[in-house]
Image: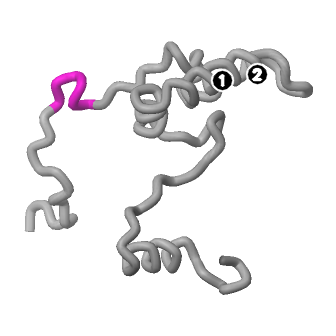
Amino acid sequence: LIESRMTRKDCLDWLKSHGYPKPPKSACIGCPFHSDAMWRSMRNNDRAAWDDAVEVDRAIRTGLRGIRGEVFLHRSGVPLDEADLSTAADHGQLDLWPNECEGMCGL
């Protein structure tokens, strides 16, 4: 793909035009940049990957040279298997206008 100078968008367009489904984003199991949605999906749909991520999270807690304090994969700074991965909807928040904002309130 690099030799063909194809971007990620080019690849997705090619897949779509040839009838392939959109592939999921790829990332390391223990990537600290995962969103809560990605962590939830892993926990709910790929238990082996989730268990591996939880193990990585435990393993890095105090084992990184040059870093003081504890290290966590989840941005909340708690063990991954204790992180709140719920959504606002899980807490009863209604989504009254999904994706309807056009930035023109009051006009």
- Disc 2 target residue: 60
* Circle 2: residue type: Ile
Question: What segment carries the magenta color?
Answer: 88-93
At horizontal 46% and vertical 26% (from top left) the residue drawn is 43
- Disc 1 target residue: 72
Q: Is residue 87 left or right of residue 57?
A: left
Given contact means CB atoms under 8 Å apart, are the residues at marks 2 and 1 in contact? yes
At horizontal 66% and vertical 85% (from top left) the residue drawn is 5
The quarter of the image holding the N terminus is: bottom right
Pointer 2 or 1: first along the chain: 2
Q: CA distance from mark 2 to mark 1?
A: 7 Å
Q: Is residue 104 above or below residue 79?
A: below
Question: Residue 22, position in %: x, y?
Answer: 41, 62
Q: Provide the secondary structure element on which disc 2 rests.
A: loop
Q: Provide the secondary structure element on which disc 1 rests.
A: loop
Q: Is residue 97 left or right of residue 84?
A: left
* Circle 1: residue type: Phe
Q: Nearer the viewer, residue 106 or 54?
A: 54
Question: Residue 100, position in %: x, y?
Answer: 15, 59
Q: Nearer the viewer, residue 70 or 86?
A: 86
